[in-house]
Amino acid sequence: MFMPHGSCRWRAWGAYRCFHRSKPLLDHAKSGNSPEVPQELLVPAQILAVRNLTPKIKELKLQVEEHSGFTFKAGNWVDFFIDQDGVSKVGGYSMSSIPSSLPELRLAVKTSRHPPAQWCHTLAQPGKWVKLKAGGSFYFDAYEHGRHLKHLIFIAGGIGINPIFSMLQDGFDGLGCNTSFA
């Protein structure tokens, strides 16, 4: 797939949005972490665990209330609202977990100067609470989209592997596909 430089945002959903968007991308502060509309449901989530995946990536294991109505599809993202420790911001992160793992979910957050990412790397700890709002139309449901596929290639680099990892975990084995993680 040829992608002209600067033609879209280079995030996991970027390639999809480049060829399927009908409206221009909006500023993050106006629309969350993507031009797509998130769910209206904003739910509290408790941090259960924080661990280093690499020197620059932290995994946050979170839990939402079991009957909160929070849902997502493998490959979706969350708006991650922090309002504590002097940080009152929202960050957007792709989930690396799958819908069937709810009420628990996982986020992998790369370090950056963005206040939510800094908070995740320095102040996030078990027992703290944040709020989440799911969103995005980038997903691949193997049962919905893949019944007649013989080959499918996903390409991602760095932290962009999160949504693809979620999609691979969620359904390819159920279709009898060979999955490998490099």
Image: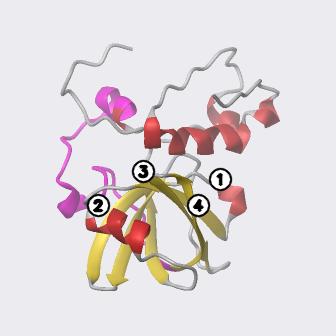
Q: Is-magenta flag for residue 26?
A: yes
Residue at image location 18% in from the left, 62% down from the top:
30
Q: Residues within 10 Å of mark 4 (few under 14, many from 20)?
A: many
Amino acid type, mark 1: Ile
CB contact under 8 Å: marks 1 and 3: no
Amino acid type, mark 2: Gly
Name the image quarter holding the C terminus: top right
Pointer 2: what residue? 32
Precedes in sequence: disc 4 or disc 1:
1
Residue at image location 40% in from the left, 39% down from the top:
13
Q: Residues within 10 Å of mark 3 (few under 14, many from 20)?
A: many
Pointer 4: what residue? 106
The range drawn in magenta is: 15-44
Give the SS element for disc 1: loop
Name the image quarter holding the N terminus: top left
Precedes in sequence: disc 4 or disc 3:
4
Q: Is-magenta flag for residue 36?
A: yes
Question: Between tags 4 and 2, which lies in front?
Answer: 4
Amino acid type, mark 3: Gly
Q: Residues within 10 Å of mark 2 (few under 14, many from 20)?
A: many
Pointer 3: what residue? 136
User: How far is disc 4 from disc 2 in space, using C-alphas?
Assistant: 19 Å
User: How many labels, in total?
Assistant: 4
Pointer 1: what residue? 98
Precedes in sequence: disc 1 or disc 2:
2
Question: Between tags 4 and 1, which lies in front?
Answer: 4
Amino acid type, mark 4: Arg
